[in-house]
Image (cartoon, grey):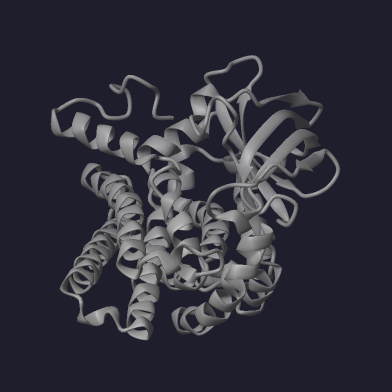
């Protein structure tokens, strides 16, 4: 599948300018992803998927992002859902006391992904961001199921996904935060609000929720798991973006090299130096992401693994923004024109340090940890 990602990247790149210009969801890219079996990347082989680990996901996301960062970013959301579900082994489920019906629901969702369904994430809210403990969306018991009500923002792929991972707090006990996998359909209304500086093709619109779902829609079958899982194993919520933005940064370097060659600017030492520094910065960030991914596969949830997870997100976000800006300067004013690849990549890269966890939050988390505090609780604002 990594070879297929490399083959698709130029095709995605050829479509990227039009999708960005129009703010249009890359439907054709997602058709290619479905036909290539990418929605089953994280699904265990026993359920019809490719059985990839976090490291393999990171490599695929990096290659897809070299084609179109927006496509890779939305795919990341799907992978975070299927990856998290696949990470709940039968042994872990037994340790957590998850009911058998929850495991059956897990397997059904993963089988559907392997067959071509894809999932979006509806977590962030206006005024709360992605902090789970501050969500206003609530759920309550309704017969044998649950009624979920609220509004989400920055829901990438809104209106196109087959189902949505929706985070909500218990209306009677707000300390309990749970997640539900809700099929697209009645009760989910998309409000087209996404008209942003970068990542314009992600269709990250608002999603209004007033839906009743059966009990099996509750992920894990036990209420209140979302906060605990986020703190114990934050890689999908924090570091899955990292590979995408390193791929965007590499695409910026590649675009600058092509531009510099075409314009005969390679004779200028300052231009060459910018490209050299950018190449080194992207390579370093990619190594950090690879190390974090390796540790996630080997020792998920361990303290040192989580440190690398936060380092990866911090470096990917800051590196993408800095590299894209430098490559724009190396290329010159002509690269600022609408439709030039570097102009789009500059805007897409700028989003990396803003997506949760933001670069400032990542840096603060790492600083608190280095000083011997509890980085999940000792910040001035709640991490989750």
Name the spot of residue 242 as percent of width and height, x first.
Answer: 38, 55
Q: Is residue 35 left or right of residue 90?
A: right
Q: Is residue 88 left or right of residue 136?
A: left
Name the spot of residue 269 as percent of width and height, x first.
Answer: 16, 74
User: How many callouts does the rendering have?
Assistant: 0
Asked where in the image residue 194 lies, by quadrant, the reply is: top right
Name the spot of residue 202 as percent of width and height, x first.
Answer: 61, 55
Instruction: Name the residue: 45% across, 49% down.
Output: 351
Instruction: Name the residue: 54% across, 40% down.
Output: 98
Name the spot of residue 264 as percent of width and height, x first.
Answer: 31, 84
Instruction: Name the residue: 44% across, 67% down.
Output: 335
**Residue at the extreme top:** 172
Q: Is residue 313 left or right of residue 40?
A: left
Residue 48 visible in this rendered orientation of the protein: no
Q: Which one is nearer the viewer's eye here, 258 or 198?
A: 258
Asked where in the image residue 119 lies, by quadrant, the reply is: bottom right
Residue 348 visible in this rendered orientation of the protein: yes
**Residue at the extreme left:** 371
Vertical position of residue 246 compared to residue 134: above or below: below
Q: Which one is nearer the viewer's eye here, 252 or 304?
A: 252
Q: Quadrant of the C terminus?
A: top left
Q: Which one is nearer the viewer's eye here, 167 or 22?
A: 22
**Residue at the extreme front:** 333
Instruction: Name the residue: 71% across, 39% down.
Output: 207
Q: Is residue 355 left or right of residue 40?
A: left
């Amino acid at each position: 599948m990594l070879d297929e990602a490399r083959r698709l990247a130029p095709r995605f790149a050829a479509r990227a300018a039009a999708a960005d210009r129009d703010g249009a969801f890359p439907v054709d890219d997602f058709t290619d992803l479905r036909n290539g079996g990418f929605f089953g990347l994280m699904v265990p082989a026993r359920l019809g998927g490719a059985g990839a680990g976090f490291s393999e996901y990171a490599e695929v996301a990096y290659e897809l992002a070299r084609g179109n960062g927006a496509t890779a970013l939305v795919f990341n959301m799907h992978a975070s859902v299927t990856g998290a579900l696949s990470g709940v082994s039968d042994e872990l489920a037994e340790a957590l006391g998850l009911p058998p019906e929850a495991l059956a629901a897990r397997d059904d969702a993963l089988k559907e992904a392997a067959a071509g369904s894809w999932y979006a994430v509806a977590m962030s809210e206006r005024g709360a961001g992605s902090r789970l403990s501050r969500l206003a969306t609530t759920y309550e018991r309704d017969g044998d199921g649950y009624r979920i009500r609220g509004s989400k923002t920055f829901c990438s792929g809104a209106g196109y996904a087959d189902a949505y991972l929706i985070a909500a707090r218990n209306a009677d006990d707000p300390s309990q935060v749970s997640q539900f996998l809700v099929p697209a359909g009645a009760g989910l209304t998309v409000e087209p609000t996404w008209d942003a500086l970068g990542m314009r093709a992600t269709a990250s619109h608002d999603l209004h929720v007033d839906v009743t779902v059966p009990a099996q829609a509750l992920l894990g079958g036990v209420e209140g798991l979302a906060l605990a899982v986020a703190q114990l194993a934050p890689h999908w919520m924090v570091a899955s973006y990292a590979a995408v933005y390193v791929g965007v940064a590499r695409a910026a370097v590649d675009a600058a090299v092509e531009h510099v060659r075409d314009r005969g600017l390679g004779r200028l030492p300052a231009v060459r130096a910018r490209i050299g520094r950018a190449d080194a910065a992207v390579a370093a960030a990619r190594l950090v992401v690879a190390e974090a991914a390796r540790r996630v596969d080997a020792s998920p949830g361990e303290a040192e693994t989580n440190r690398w997870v936060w380092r990866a997100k911090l470096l990917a976000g800051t590196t993408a923004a800095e590299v894209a800006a430098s490559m724009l300067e190396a290329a010159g004013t002509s690269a600022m024109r609408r439709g030039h690849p570097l102009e789009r990549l500059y805007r897409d890269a700028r989003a990396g340090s803003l997506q949760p966890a933001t670069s400032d939050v990542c840096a603060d988390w790492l600083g608190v940890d280095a000083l011997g505090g509890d980085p999940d609780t000792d910040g001035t604002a709640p991490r989750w």
